[in-house]
């Protein structure tokens, strides 16, 4: 019982309070003064009359569930409910209300709702998405809040914008999800019947005839065999008619609709006009019709008019007995086999072969395995081989052969592609030059030296004799440039003569040029490099095949061979001169390796000196690269080096210097940059970055481009030793490859 509100009977509620502040409830939004703090309390933090504060915490304790945000934890997870709503229909006699089915989708990631109505054929109602996906507020007076998952259950009414939706069921995922939340799910309900839909269904059922129509299903055949075509090769023998002959045709049978198309194969120069098709696509009857049928006489169905005119209340039914229908037999795929004779509108054709797809079709469907073609052509007569008369000695053999191939003689054609590939191109001469000696007993001719040049562009050979002082022999051109025949061939014969090829020339080879016998004793550096580069054409320069041959020779006595090499190396340096290496190889191989093969092994295992790269040349090349890009950010590059140099010594580690250069994207190749850094390296892998930046700065310290002289083709070479000739050979590497690494 409350005390009366009189002096002495009321209590001061402010006694003991320490907070009397007021919350700011009003403010400006888009320059409009309005109420902003609806959830803020009153004086001193107390709630205003009728005010409810939303809870700041979840109903679940901390630690239960995932810590991931909702848009991650519930991504692509949707609750689906089946519902319906009742819609009133005015001014219609057939219906007063309408039951409309719909689906309610609740998206767990953001609490949005979407309502979709399945489309019904011929409903006349705009269907589909009724309510687009968004957060739907609760009905008044709680319209400041939105629907959550707690508001949904089966057999429950949901109000969306004053429209009542009755939830009757849900899917299995929704049912399991609500159970995990602790929601007691109501039993599923049922959707009441729609009076108008029931009436429309009764009308549609009454429109169906009691007697079923005759079924003619051609859609399945079309879907199963669309683009499947059988191909037969057939023959039409029309020799009995005047000016007739045998004609080859191709028959296409379309499995999709059992139609036939025939195309004629017209050979060239036959004198016939090339028509598109011989028979247009259509069904092919087995028997020729005796008369022409009237339009509409040949139909797939027969219709009987029961009573009344057509289209004005009349009734008609299908005649299952097909009274008066015209029966025609058409060719099917079962009638077409190899060797069968078919009648194409009075023309008898024989199927003599088919393609692979047709064979597979008859093999799988009918189990036919014999597809032997029918031989209808007479065996062709053997083609008489054209005999070429023997060479008569006038002109070249190629020129004489061209006069036998046609009435109008044409000059022989040279291999233009080979000429373009192997002709001289820049510093690449494509000329193989060898040093040769005459094989003779004449002491004067034994001292003569010859240069044999082989031109790869046209397989011609030229022999030149260098001038020797006080020899008594006038040097100069010994053999004009031409193709040289191999010795021992008959002169007057029908076959073409064999000429010397590039693979026939190598160091140590003995050749016979028009009766003059030569032995090749040396070659220039270009020959060795070209042969080693194209080792598949020159087996004498293929190091892999030479090593395989050498292993077969020395596999029986490895210890003696090692001792033989060590005995010829008095300094124990694992190296020896090429002359000593050559003598040892000749003794070991017992003349089983040619001189060129020994040279190839010596070149492969030669001990070459490492060339020191000049810093000035590297700087000039680097500055040329930086000019072309262009790169001028040297001041910031130097500042970056100074910033990373904590001790201010002007030195940085190699790896750190390379990292800074990569960070500034200096446009230099990696191998060139590594060489420059190596040249500026000082003690303990420290790089002097001051000198490095100064050498790269092409603005302040330009370095003139170095002039390099390219390798020239020496046309006057007379067999002298070149600068890149092999001087020493590392025989230890050879022994390791032959017998493996051993101590």
Image (tube, rainbow, N blue to C red):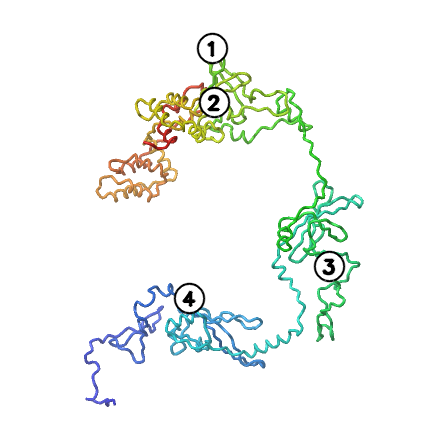
Element assignment for label 1: helix
Q: Position of residue 109 (x, y in %)?
A: 39, 66
**Can the viewer see residue 607?**
no
Q: Position of residue 710 (x, y in %)?
A: 41, 27
Residue under label 4, please give it.
77
Q: Position of residue 168 (x, y in %)?
A: 46, 76
The quarter of the picture where residue 94 lies is bottom right
Decide which of tag 2 and tag 4 comes sooner along the chain. Answer: 4
**Distance of label 1 from label 3 (alpha carbons):** 103 Å
Residue under label 2, please give it.
433
Indicate whether 560 appears above or below 335.
above
Q: Position of residue 34 (x, y in %)?
A: 34, 73
Indicate whether 138 appears above or below 75.
below
Decide which of tag 4 and tag 3 comes sooner along the chain. Answer: 4
Mark 3 Cα-neighbour bin, 10 Å: few <14, some 14–19, many ≥20: few
Q: Is residue 142 left or right of residue 204?
A: left
Residue under label 1, please give it.
443
Nearer the observer: mark 1 or 2; the answer is: 1
**Distance of label 1 from label 4 (alpha carbons):** 105 Å
Element assignment for label 2: strand
């Amino acid at each position: 019982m409350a005390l009366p509100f009189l002096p002495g009977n009321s209590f001061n509620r402010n006694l003991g309070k320490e907070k009397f502040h007021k919350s700011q409830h009003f403010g400006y939004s888009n320059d409009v003064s309005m109420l902003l703090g609806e959830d803020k309390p009153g004086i001193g933090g107390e709630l205003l009359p009728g005010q409810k504060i939303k809870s700041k915490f979840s109903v679940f304790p901390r630690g239960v569930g995932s810590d991931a945000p909702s848009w991650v934890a519930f991504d692509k997870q949707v609750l689906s409910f089946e519902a319906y709503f009742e819609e009133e229909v005015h001014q219609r006699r057939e219906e007063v209300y309408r039951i409309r089915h719909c689906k309610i989708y609740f998206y767990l990631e953001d609490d949005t709702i979407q309502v979709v109505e399945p489309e019904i054929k011929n409903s006349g109602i705009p269907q589909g998405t009724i309510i687009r996906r968004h957060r739907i507020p609760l009905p008044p007076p709680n319209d400041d809040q939105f629907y959550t998952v707690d508001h949904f259950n089966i057999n429950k009414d949901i109000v969306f914008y004053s429209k009542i939706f009755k939830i009757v069921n849900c899917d299995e995922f929704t049912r399991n999800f609500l159970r995990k939340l602790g929601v007691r799910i109501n039993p599923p309900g049922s959707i009441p019947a729609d009076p108008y839909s029931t009436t429309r269904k009764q009308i549609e059922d009454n429109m169906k005839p009691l007697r079923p129509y005759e079924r003619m299903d051609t859609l399945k055949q079309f879907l199963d065999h669309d683009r499947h075509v059988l191909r037969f090769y057939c023959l039409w023998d029309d020799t009995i008619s005047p000016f007739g002959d045998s004609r080859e045709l191709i028959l296409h049978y379309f499995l999709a609709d059992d139609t036939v198309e025939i195309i004629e194969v017209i050979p060239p120069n036959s004198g016939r006009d090339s028509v598109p098709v011989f028979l247009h696509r259509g069904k092919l009857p087995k028997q020729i019709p005796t008369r022409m049928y009237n339009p509409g006489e040949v139909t797939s169905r027969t219709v009987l008019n029961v009573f009344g005119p057509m289209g004005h209340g009349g009734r008609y039914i299908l005649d299952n007995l097909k009274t008066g229908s015209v029966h025609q037999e058409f060719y099917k795929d079962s009638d077409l086999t190899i060797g069968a004779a078919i009648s194409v509108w009075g023309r008898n054709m024989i199927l003599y072969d088919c393609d692979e797809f047709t064979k597979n079709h008859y093999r799988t469907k009918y189990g036919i395995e014999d597809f032997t073609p029918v031989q209808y052509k007479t065996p062709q007569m053997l083609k008489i081989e054209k005999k070429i008369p023997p060479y008569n000695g006038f002109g070249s053999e190629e020129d004489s052969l061209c006069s036998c191939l046609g009435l109008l003689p044409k000059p022989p054609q040279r291999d233009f592609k080979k000429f373009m590939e192997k002709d001289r191109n820049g510093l690449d001469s494509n000329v193989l030059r060898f040093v040769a000696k005459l094989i003779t007993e004449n002491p004067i001719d034994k001292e003569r030296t010859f240069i044999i040049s082989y031109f790869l562009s046209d397989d011609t050979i030229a022999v030149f004799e260098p001038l020797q002082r006080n020899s008594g022999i006038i040097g100069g051109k010994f053999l004009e440039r031409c193709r040289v025949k191999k010795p021992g061939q008959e002169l007057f014969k029908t076959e073409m003569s064999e000429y010397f090829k590039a693979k026939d020339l190598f160091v140590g080879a003995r050749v016979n040029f028009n009766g003059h016998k030569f032995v090749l004793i040396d070659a220039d550096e270009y020959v060795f490099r070209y042969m080693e580069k194209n080792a598949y054409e020159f087996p004498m320069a293929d190091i892999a095949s030479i090593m395989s041959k050498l292993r077969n020779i020395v596999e029986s006595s490895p210890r003696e061979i090692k001792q033989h090499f060590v005995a010829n190396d008095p300094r124990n340096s694992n190296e020896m001169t090429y002359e000593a290496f050559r003598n040892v190889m000749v003794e070991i191989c017992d003349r089983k390796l040619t001189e060129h093969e020994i040279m190839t092994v010596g070149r492969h295992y030669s001990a070459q000196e490492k060339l020191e790269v000049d810093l000035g040349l590297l700087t000039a090349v680097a500055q040329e690269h930086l000019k072309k890009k262009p790169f001028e950010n040297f001041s910031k590059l130097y500042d970056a080096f100074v910033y990373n140099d904590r001790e201010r010594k002007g030195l940085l580690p190699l790896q750190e210097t390379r990292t800074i250069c990569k960070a500034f994207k200096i446009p230099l190749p990696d191998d060139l940059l590594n060489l420059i850094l190596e040249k500026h390296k000082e003690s303990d892998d420290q790089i002097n970055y001051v000198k490095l930046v100064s050498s790269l700065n092409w603005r302040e310290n330009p370095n003139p481009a170095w002039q390099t002289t390219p390798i020239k083709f020496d046309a006057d070479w007379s067999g002298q030793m070149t600068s890149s000739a092999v001087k020493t050979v590392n025989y230890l590497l050879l022994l390791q490859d032959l017998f493996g690494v051993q101590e």
